[in-house]
Every structure is written in structure tokens, then in C-alpha cells.
Image (cartoon, grey):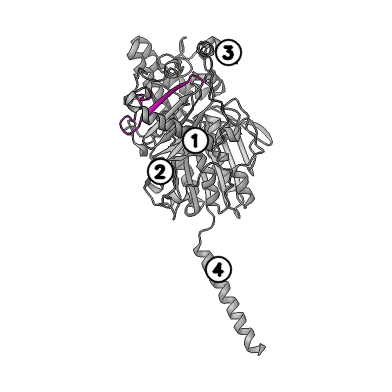
């Protein structure tokens, strides 16, 4: 009996083993994740997103990524400023819950983050480039990051072994390191998640030497709201300090020294980052810089521009430098995509492109971010997931940067903790929107009084309506995005919209409670309000 049964048993075991192997071969393994991330990259500075800059289009590689994956048209941040947005992403939680509310805070690296959770299920993790959370990275098998904002030219990066200066342009340098880790230094037996994070295109918008004269021969289209007068906004829009007209420095932001040539040491009196970068340049880089900017600066001085014409000139200089920095980013995305393909990893690697928030490119006459208006509230998000996401697809559901962490966890096949505020985007990436997908987002900005003087505010955003509450000043703004996509007409004081205002206020209070945001919304005294709006008082309060 045994001599008859044993061969049958062996055959059955072999058949089961073969079937198991075949099934395993058919199932895709857990995907690798390459998360390419920039600083202050506005969606309307990406060709695939359209908008008034689409004709310039400095992003053919990002556009190609969108053509191969999914572009999210309604992608937003939870707190529009560099460090807090990064904390939102890495924890999947709003700022009050992860403890990093503004750039003056220090991130508690001991808390739960998605890289740590990926490590627990066998992923190898890495982060390179801009970190900006003040504490050292935790949850990464390999990390090498910029101190603070970092430098554009010949940047210092540090890791567990200390600091080192690297020759070259920062976007190129960081990408070189990421490609080296991808090809040589990672453990090929493990799936990986790599965050490649860039300083560009952050202020003060210093392009790579190869791009210093890019766009010199064209006129950038002006944004339609360049000369917005803030006629019915809450008072904060009139008291901000981020106008191209009144606040953008000719010296540090626009590289127009007061002295002959490029006398940065005498000329730069405001933001010191341009001077710091100038001092890190080698002789060739300085020569390239001088050759590119001096003729343009001389022509501008000779023109003796004033008023609106000067604003128009400043806009052109600013946006061209910004787009030159974006061009460097886009070229390096192309390099990273090629490296993934050359390594034979393309079919099982999710490629994500995003930035920490949007940015004003002259919209409303501004630069910088912070507000809940669309240009800084909206952030780019493009995801390519081979074999899962339909190429060239566009999603219009409301998503937020707190969703990234649960998305990566579900991609890795691991459990999503209950305390994460975000929701996995995996169903959307598969082309199916759940019936209970959110129809509103919560926003909270905290950094006031501080740089650019944007008041603290909370808000609720729906597909059509938006309400912002500048709570320390007791003021509201409400917009109908269907009829007023540029947010030029504040409806909060319009009697005919009182019913909608009341409904949105109620929904905002409920949303704040649902996320257990403890912020006291009691307005400050009129005396305090007046004092902080005097710039001299800001330094005294600090």
C-alpha cells in the first residue's frame, strides 16, 4: 500500500509546489517606491497641469510621468509651509497631531512614521536631500540630508558620520547620490522605498549654471491676477509681506546688486541665502553667474523702470529664475526614471512626484505660499504604478498629503494604523472611487507673526466651496470656486450667501472636532492685532 501511495503523494506534493510557484510568479511582488519630492513647485508650473504657464512648459519629463501614470487634479496640502507639510506626509496626520506646526518646531522622530512601518515589513528605506525637520531622520536604513534649507551650489550634506561638502549643483548632487544608492548600495533582496527630496525651486531661485540664460529670449506670460487689489479680502491679505511689488528684494531675490558687477557682499541686505550661495561657488561658477546676469542687470538699470513696469520686470526675472530651477528638477526626474529602467526595476516600481505645497508665481501679486488660496493650497501629485494605474489617467477626487502614508502602507501590503488621519489612494489608483470618499478637506496654518505675515487660519474646502477663518482676527473669507476659480470675490459678507456661510461654518467646526484639533479660536484683542501688524513689533514679540 505504501509503495503505491508514496509516488502519488510525491506527485501531489510536487504538483502543489509547482502550482504555488506559478501563482507566485503571476502575483506581482510588493512594489518598490521612488518618491521624488521638491520644494515649492506649483502645479501651474507643470505642463501636464495646464494653466497660464503651459506654453513655456519646463517639465517634459514630469509630463511623461503623467502620461504613464495618474495625475491628481484636486491634490492639496494640510498646512502650506515646508517643514509642516513634510511632517504631514511622513506621519499621515494633521499638524496638531504630529506636533510640527511651523518651521520653528522640531520634529519628534520617535513617533510613528510610514518609513518605520515599512521597515517592520521588510522594506529597505532611504532619504536623500532636503529634510527640514530639525531632528535627524529616523526609520531609514540610509539617510544623507541637507542641513536646514541647504545650498544650491556645492552643498553640504550630512549623515550619521558627519558633514561633507559636495561639488556641483544641489539638484544634480542629490540625484547622483540617489542613483548610486539605487544601483549599488541597496540590498537587492528587499523591496525599497526611497525619498529623493530637493531644495529646488525654493527661494532664492538659483538655477544651475547650464540654465542661467534659459528663457532669455522669450517673454513669460503674466498671470491674470498679478495686480490684484485685495478689495474685499479679509484684512490679512492687505497686511501680508509677500508682494513682488513691495517685498521682493532686488538684491537677494532678483540678483541685481547695487554696486558694479556682482558686489554681493555690499548689496545683499535682506535674505542672506543668495550671499551664502555666492560664497560657496567656485571661480568658474562665479564667472558663469556674472556672465549671465550682468548684461541683463545693466540693461534693467539703464531702463530706469518704475511703478507697474518695474513690477512687470521683477515678475519676469523672478519667474524665469524659478522656471530655470524647475528645469533642473525635470532633467533629474528624467535621469531617475532612466536609472530605474536601466536597473531592471521599472515594471515593479511605483514612481511618485510631488512637492510640499504650491506657490505664488505672481498670482495675486505674490510669491511664497502659506495661504489656503488655491495656488498655495494645491500641490502636484503624479503617480505611476505599472500594471495597476491606467496610463494617462486623471483623477478629480479630493486628496491631501496626509494620504501618502496610508497609500504607501497599502501598496506594501501592511496594515494602516487607526490613528492615521489620511486615507489610502490605492482604490483611486486602481480606477475606482469608493462611494464614501471624502467630499471635504481640513486645513490649518499656524506661523504668525512671522516671515511674510500671513495670519493663522483654519479652513474647509469642498469641490465647489471654500471657507477660511482667520481666527485671531475674527474674520472669514468664502469663495465659490465654480464661478470664481481665482478667488477674487469674497462672499463672506454678502447677505445673499448668508445661508451658505452659516452651513460652512458649522461644517468647519465639525471637521475641526473630528480631527480633535485643540486650537482655541477666540479672536485676539484689537490692541494685539494692531501691534503685530507693525513689523517692528514682530521682532519684539519674537
**Element class at badge 3:** helix
x, y (%) of residue 88? Answer: 54, 36
Mark 1–mark 2 Cα distance, whole angstroms, equals 21 Å
Q: Is residue 318 left or right of residue 272?
A: left
Give the camera-side residue of 541 and 196.
541
Disc 3 crowd, CA 10 A, few/some/many (<14, 14-19, 20+): few
* Mark 4 or mark 3, earlier in chain: 4
Mark 4–mark 2 Cα distance, whole angstroms, equals 38 Å
* Mark 2 or mark 3, earlier in chain: 2
Give the camera-side residue of 64 and 426.
426
* Mark 1 or mark 3, earlier in chain: 1
Give the vertical position of 363 relative to 429 (above or below): above
* Mark 1 or mark 2, earlier in chain: 2
**Element class at badge 4:** helix
Q: Nearer the viewer, mark 4 or mark 3?
A: 3
Q: Which mark is residue 21?
A: 4
Q: Which mark is residue 397?
A: 2
x, y (%) of residue 338? Answer: 46, 46
Residue 78 visible in the shown view: yes
Q: How many marks?
A: 4
The verdict on residue 488 being magenta is yes
Most common SS among magenta residues = loop
Which residue range is magenta in the image?
A: 472-492
Residue on which the image places disc 3: 539
Q: Nearer the viewer, mark 4 or mark 2?
A: 2
Q: Which mark is residue 510?
A: 1
Mark 4–mark 3 Cα distance, whole angstroms, equals 67 Å
Amino acid at each position: 500500500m505504501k509503495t503505491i501511495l508514496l509516488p502519488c503523494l510525491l506527485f501531489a506534493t510536487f504538483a502543489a509546489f509547482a502550482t504555488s510557484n506559478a501563482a507566485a510568479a503571476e502575483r506581482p511582488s510588493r512594489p518598490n517606491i521612488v518618491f521624488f519630492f521638491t520644494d515649492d513647485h506649483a502645479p501651474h508650473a507643470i505642463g501636464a497641469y495646464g494653466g497660464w504657464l503651459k506654453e513655456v512648459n519646463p517639465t517634459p519629463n514630469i509630463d511623461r510621468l503623467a502620461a504613464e501614470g495618474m495625475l491628481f487634479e484636486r491634490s492639496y496640502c494640510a498646512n502650506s509651509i515646508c517643514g509642516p507639510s513634510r511632517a504631514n506626509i511622513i506621519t499621515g496626520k494633521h499638524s496638531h497631531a504630529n506636533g510640527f506646526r511651523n518651521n520653528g518646531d522640531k520634529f519628534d522622530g520617535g513617533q510613528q512614521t510610514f518609513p518605520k512601518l515599512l521597515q517592520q515589513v521588510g522594506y529597505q528605506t532611504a532619504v536623500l536631500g532636503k529634510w527640514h525637520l530639525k531632528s535627524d531622520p529616523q526609520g531609514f536604513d540610509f539617510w544623507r540630508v541637507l542641513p536646514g534649507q541647504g545650498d544650491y551650489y556645492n552643498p553640504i550634506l550630512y549623515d550619521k558620520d558627519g558633514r561633507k561638502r559636495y561639488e556641483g549643483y544641489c539638484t544634480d548632487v542629490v540625484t547622483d547620490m540617489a542613483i548610486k544608492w539605487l544601483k549599488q548600495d541597496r540590498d537587492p533582496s528587499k523591496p525599497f522605498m526611497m525619498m529623493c527630496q530637493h531644495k529646488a525651486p525654493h527661494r532664492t531661485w538659483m538655477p544651475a549654471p547650464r540654465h542661467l540664460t534659459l528663457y532669455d529670449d522669450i517673454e513669460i506670460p503674466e498671470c491674470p491676477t498679478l495686480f490684484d487689489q485685495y478689495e474685499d479680502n479679509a484684512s490679512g491679505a492687505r497686511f501680508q509681506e509677500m508682494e513682488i511689488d513691495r517685498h521682493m528684494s532686488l538684491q537677494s531675490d532678483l540678483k541685481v546688486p547695487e554696486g558694479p558687477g556682482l558686489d554681493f557682499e555690499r548689496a545683499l541686505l535682506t535674505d542672506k541665502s543668495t550671499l551664502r550661495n555666492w560664497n560657496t561657488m567656485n571661480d568658474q561658477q562665479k564667472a558663469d553667474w556674472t556672465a549671465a546676469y550682468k548684461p541683463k542687470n545693466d540693461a534693467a538699470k539703464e531702463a530706469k523702470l518704475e511703478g507697474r513696469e518695474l513690477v512687470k520686470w521683477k515678475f519676469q526675472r523672478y519667474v524665469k529664475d524659478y522656471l530655470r530651477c524647475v528645469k533642473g528638477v525635470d532633467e533629474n526626474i528624467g535621469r531617475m526614471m532612466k536609472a530605474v529602467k536601466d536597473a531592471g526595476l521599472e515594471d515593479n516600481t511605483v514612481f511618485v512626484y510631488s512637492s510640499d505645497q504650491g506657490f505664488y508665481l505672481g498670482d495675486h501679486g505674490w510669491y511664497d505660499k502659506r495661504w489656503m488660496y488655491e495656488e498655495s493650497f494645491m500641490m502636484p501629485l503624479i503617480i505611476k504604478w505599472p500594471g495597476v494605474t491606467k496610463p494617462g489617467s486623471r483623477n478629480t477626487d479630493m486628496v491631501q498629503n496626509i494620504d501618502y502614508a496610508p497609500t504607501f502602507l497599502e501598496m506594501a501590503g501592511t496594515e494602516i494604523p487607526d490613528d492615521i488621519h489620511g486615507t489610502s489612494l490605492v482604490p483611486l489608483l486602481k480606477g475606482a472611487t469608493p462611494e464614501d470618499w471624502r467630499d471635504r478637506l481640513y486645513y490649518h496654518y499656524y506661523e504668525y507673526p512671522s516671515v511674510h505675515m500671513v495670519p493663522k487660519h483654519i479652513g474647509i474646502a469642498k469641490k465647489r466651496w471654500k471657507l477660511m477663518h482667520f481666527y485671531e482676527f475674527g474674520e472669514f473669507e468664502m469663495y465659490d470656486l465654480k464661478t470664481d476659480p481665482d478667488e477674487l470675490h469674497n462672499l463672506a459678507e454678502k447677505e445673499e450667501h448668508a445661508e451658505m456661510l452659516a452651513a460652512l461654518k458649522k461644517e468647519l467646526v465639525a471637521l475641526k472636532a473630528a480631527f480633535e484639533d485643540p486650537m482655541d479660536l477666540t479672536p485676539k484683542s484689537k490692541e494685539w492685532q494692531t501691534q503685530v501688524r507693525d513689523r517692528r513689533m514682530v521682532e519684539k514679540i519674537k
